[in-house]
Image (cartoon, coloured by chain):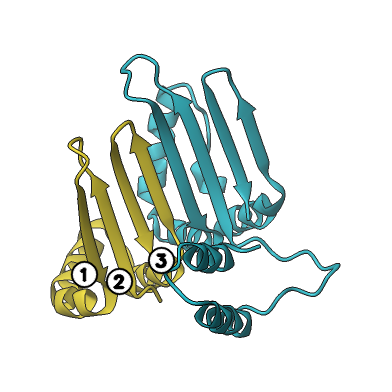
Chain colours: A cyan, B yellow
């Protein structure tokens, strides 16, 4: 069940909309985003980062981070790297080498980063710690 | 293209601050200033203005659907791009 559908059902449960209105909304949603054909894996659109940490020190309860970034936004950001002038990359290389990270950023081409984002679809990071949980995945 | 950016902030006293920013009107109002800032930055950093504007446009176009929610104790900041 997608998020919009769940929101409509929640509104129905809370009595904010009538059953007829909810049906109309769901119909409109289906027209806008048709259900995928069974058997085909839909392409993820978002990179999701969820962090829940119990902050026992302050006594204020837990900290929660929920970030959803469109993969398209990552691709657009990667294309911006093509605008970075070579002298800036050379300076960054020097600073990285000085900090003990001998990475040559001039070898990093936008198409490589594009490929990287293309394969983020399969990425799932799941960290379970007694005090915190971190999940990174595409949806 | 995103239509609305919603910013919600829950303060430590539990009260919510809500801001709804319509993207297109704000962009239209600020466009002369933004254009000037981009052009000046491009000249200073020797970057192609056309490429920079295209890149910024692509970023804006692709930002629809982004969501950032950070909650700590009683305070929270939620930013949605719709």
Height in image: A102 above or below A45?
above
Height in image: A80 above or below A86?
below
- Tell me the mark number nearer the camera, choosing from 3 and 2: 3
Task: Tell me the quarter of the picture where residue B48 sits.
Answer: bottom left
Q: N-terminal of the two: label 1 or label 3?
A: 1
Circles 3, 2 touching at the beta carbon (< 8 Å): no
Same chain for marks 1 and 3? yes
Q: Mark 3 lies on which chain?
A: B
At which x and y percent is residue B17?
Answer: 19, 52
Q: Quadrant of the C terminus of chain B?
A: bottom left
Circles 1, 2 touching at the beta carbon (< 8 Å): yes
Q: Can residue A73 be seen in this view?
A: yes
> A7 left or right of A91?
right
Q: Name the residue under label 2.
A: B49
Residue B59: image tag: 3
Report the residue at 62% width, 46% height from top.
A137
Circle 3: element type: helix
Same chain for marks 3 and 2? yes
Q: Can residue A91 be seen in this view?
A: no
Q: N-terminal of the two: label 3 or label 2?
A: 2
């Amino acid at each position: 069940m997608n998020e919009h559908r769940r929101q409509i059902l929640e509104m129905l449960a809370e009595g904010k909309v009538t059953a007829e209105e909810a049906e109309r909304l769901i119909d409109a949603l289906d027209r806008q985003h048709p259900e995928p054909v069974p058997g085909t894996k839909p392409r993820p659109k978002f990179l999701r980062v969820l962090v829940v940490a119990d902050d026992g020190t302050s006594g204020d309860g837990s900290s929660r981070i929920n970030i959803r970034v469109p993969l398209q936004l990552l691709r657009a950001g990667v294309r911006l790297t093509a605008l970075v002038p070579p002298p800036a990359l050379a300076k960054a290389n020097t600073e990285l080498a000085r900090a003990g990270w001998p990475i040559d950023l001039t070898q990093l081409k936008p198409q490589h980063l594009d490929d990287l984002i293309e394969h983020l679809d399969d990425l799932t990071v799941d960290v379970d710690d007694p005090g915190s949980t971190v999940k990174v995945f595409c949806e | 293209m995103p239509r609305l950016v919603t910013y919600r902030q829950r303060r430590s006293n539990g009260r919510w601050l809500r801001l709804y920013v319509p993207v297109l009107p704000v962009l239209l109002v600020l466009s002369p200033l933004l254009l000037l800032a981009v052009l000046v930055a491009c000249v200073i950093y020797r970057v192609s203005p056309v490429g920079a504007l295209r890149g910024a446009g692509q970023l804006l176009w692709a930002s629809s659907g982004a969501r950032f929610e950070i909650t700590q104790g009683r305070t929270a900041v939620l930013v949605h791009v719709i």
